[in-house]
Amino acid sequence: MSFNELNSVEHYIIHQLSGVNLNNKEAREPESGYGAHWKFKSSNEIQRGVNEVLVESDLKEALIRLNPEIGVNPILADEVIYKLRTVLIAVNQVGLVKANEEFFKWLTGEKTMPFGENNRHVPVRLIDFDDLSNNSYIVTNQYRIHNRETKIPDVVMMINGVPVVVGEAKTPIRPSVSWLDGAHEVHDIYENSVPQLFVPNILSFATEGKELYYGAIRTPLEFWAPWRLENDDDALAKRMGLAEIGKELSDLLSPARLLDIMQNFSLFTSNKKKQRIKIICRFQQYEGANKIVERVKEGQVKKGLIWHFQGSGKSLLMVFAAQKLRKSSELKSPTVIVLVDRTDLDTQISGTFNAADVPNVETTDSISELQELLERDTRKIIISMIFKFRDAKPNMNTRDNIIVLVDEAHRTQEGDLGRQMRAALPNAFLFGLTGTPVNKADKNTFWAFGAEDDEGGYMSRYTFQDSIRDNATLPLHFEPRLVDVHVDKETIDKAMVDFKEATGLTDEEADALNQKSAKMAAFLKSPERVSKIVKDISEHYNEKVAPHGFKAMIVTPDRHACVQYKEELDKYFPEEASTVVISTSANDDFEFKQKWGVDKNKQEKIVEEFCDPKSEIKFIIVTAKLLTGFDAPVLQTMYLDKSIKDHTLLQAICRTNRLYTNKSFGRIVDYYGVFDDAAKALQFDEESVKKVITNLSELRSKLPQAMKDALSHFDGVDRSLDGFEGLEVAQNAIKTDEAKDAYAKDYKYLSKLWESLSPDNILDLYNEDYKWLSQVFESVKPASDNIGKLLWFSLGAQTTKLIHDNIHVGEVHQLDEFVLDADVIEDIFNNPDPKNAKKLERILIKRFKKHGGDPRFKKLSERLEALRDKAELGLITSIEFVKELCKIAKETVQAEKEKEQLIEEKSPKAALSELFLELKTDQTPAVVERIVSDIDAIVRVVSFPGWQQTNAGEREVQKSLRKQLLKYKLHKDQLLFERAYAYIKEYY
């Protein structure tokens, strides 16, 4: 038996979850009763119609079992099912996220019905969360469902007759097919074609047997996440493939885990555009939040330090932890205090809680208010700032079910704040969260939060490498720039010897420091230097940032430098393209304050506008503000001209590492020389952190080998050949799927390097080779409806531009083939060239073979055979041969037309294939088939019913056809275009 998607991945999933081996028809293990494990049922054993989402018989049984009121009067179950059906049907009006949110309220027991005495409302339970063995867990495969269309997801998992998980399996033996193809099917196809199936959905998953990723409804593919096993750091090194996936599947999809995710780790929130979105936890958030909850429940160790790298979702971790702590009945309504140390962080954290509609959240604006809340024994989630504890009284509240979560814990231990907090809340649990590793020299942080029981002082750790591996954050690249404007290190040391380092200074402190260091300020802000830097920024931004649709941040030495940079930048960009975000002080001139001061409300508006990719703001200019707690995924490049180190530096540069569409890395362009010694700039004991930054010089050194690897697929190919012949030779060098996939893998790596380095002049050395490789890649890329999403990715902006700019390379040669039609036959009849007659003869033989056993074509074939015999025996002249041959050809065309009329619906693709495949030879298979597939795919996308009758429709289809022919350098062949278009017009 060969390996395929069904027998090697889909059946493995079923076996892993239920113990049933579908590859062995005889071995069907006995079905047990209820229990907290999955039981397999084939889809035809499940009692439901193809239009029904719920297995109503199972659901009714569960409602009777779990609800005493319904148990007494089973007919009430029908009322609940009717309500649930209404939610399913409403998906077409309210949208999938809102319908899912409504159904979740039913699943989690938040909904009530008037089933009690005197019509008293009582909660309705669809699932038993207290005794998991009291639910039925069914897993099935090839689950046919019809809504707008009929679809057949590979794996569907149901709890009490409600489908809560959809899974898609892909083949493990094609390198270009990955989990992304399965996720694409779930997200882009199933969620739109059969949305009702996803109304009760907890999560969906996809795997090709090598990697497992999962996501919530409407989650873009770049935000799907892998599931990791706790304390299994080297699992991937030890066990690749099915064994590892099996462990992750069993862990993620165990009933206890799924129901925990549904109850405590699912949020419905609103994004900046006020759209409703659903968020479920990533592994590190699930693990970190649960460790906090477990430690509180155990009550033995009263603290813990959590290091989860910048950008990996600490705000959500705190929401999940706070939510689960508040819901825990054994903690008897605890108070959860979330402490932050800056106003901008306060906004971010409280914004996350408020947007997610977490109940009972209070944000305090004053120390007295915070103290009053604690003294009143408030049982809520309280968000406050840590400095408000400065004047806190001892023993403000001595309860032991107070849990304090301190954000960015490494910066909060100034003075005795940690001790004051402990004195005010002597029995509270204290958990510190940080996005940067804590320097071992930082005794205060370890004293306040690090438990001796925890290895290395951390209760939970999620490193930079972990976050990159799991696609939680992006790699960081830095570019040292313009040596002649770098700061002279000796000058710095002399100027700053008596002053505190600039780490974490406020705007005002930075100004004061620079005033004391006049030489330094004079150098940094000299008009000539700023002018040079801004000119370089404008060129760099236009070349490397703008083409991708990203934005940038400029970090300057002080507030006045922000203004200086802004005024200089206005020479290169419209005034509205950049904005300054600084605070002003009482000592500032009135004019300065009026023009440049940014209050909290204005800052929020600027940030919101900056985060909108379509807005006019391209640059945000800062010195201290927005370097922490600022999430703008569209921000990709930071232009850094300020001395910052350690935690502040790591936090600042990580503003650029957030995930965003088509963004593959964050970039820091270093004008100050901060990274001249990266190890010193990032002074942590953790070796891994020193690898956070990738210098462009490292990438440059990798380019020659990457180019060599990509070209190695075309050994012996003459790359100087132009036009169709050159393309054909290149394609024939990688004609198998395996060869194409191997090339795609090497080209993908090369193109990422190219995009990262562009416009570095080292690329000039390889430009012609890269241009050639890019065009070959584009020409062999599978049609959009048959695409391996991981290897056959969208090209970067620089590469796309290069292809577009150079698409007309070389001469375009006319293809030496023609189509059999009346005009061609007439032409051969009037010009009896033996060469053309021979071609016509070959075409007819192929056509007769194609029509197989059809008696009309058999007779024509016999006549052709007899004619050839006569010609070979010299019984007829060549002119007579051509005339008779043309007669047979005409009759063949007529017979084909008659046959076509008998076929009610002819495949457009097959019709189009006839155009291209008439003269297909062994030398040109790949190209011909791809042209047909590509045109078929693109026309299906752009055409619409009745397009032939509208100018706009005809224009759009013609444009798309020319675009596809251009890809194969056939765009100048007008005859080919006209005939292809005629076929499309007739059949599509």
Image (cartoon, grey):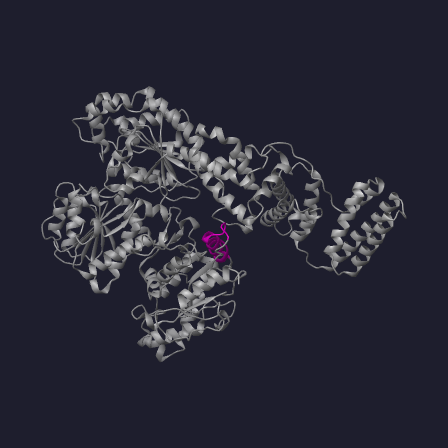
Q: Is residue 524 left or right of residue 398?
A: right
**Residue at x 10% of width, y 53% of height:** 395
Reply above or below: 90 against 817: below
Reply above or below: 28 against 364: below
- Which residue is more in the foreground, 904 or 826? 826
**Which image quadrant is residue 334 in?**
bottom left
Does 945 appear in magenta? Answer: no
* Image location (x, y in percent) of residue 598: 29, 34
Q: Is residue 793 left or right of residue 356?
A: right
* Image location (x, y in percent) of residue 323: 27, 57
- Which residue is more in the foreground, 683 or 652? 683
Label count reads 0
Residue at the limit of the structure toward the bottom, as seen here = 72
- Which residue is more in the foreground, 840 or 278? 840
* Image location (x, y in percent) of residue 736: 57, 48
Reply above or below: 920 against 505: below
Q: Is residue 226 left or right of residue 178?
A: left
**Which image quadrant is residue 595 in?**
top left
Residue at the limit of the structure toward the left, as seen here = 394
- Which residue is more in the foreground, 763 or 64? 763
Q: Main secondary structure of the magenta part?
A: helix
**From this viewpoint, is residue 87 visible?**
no
**From this viewpoint, is residue 474 visible?**
yes
* Image location (x, y in percent) of residue 476: 35, 39
Reply above or below: 365 against 725: below
> Which residue range is magenta in the image?
174-192
**Residue at x 21% of width, y 25% of height:** 493
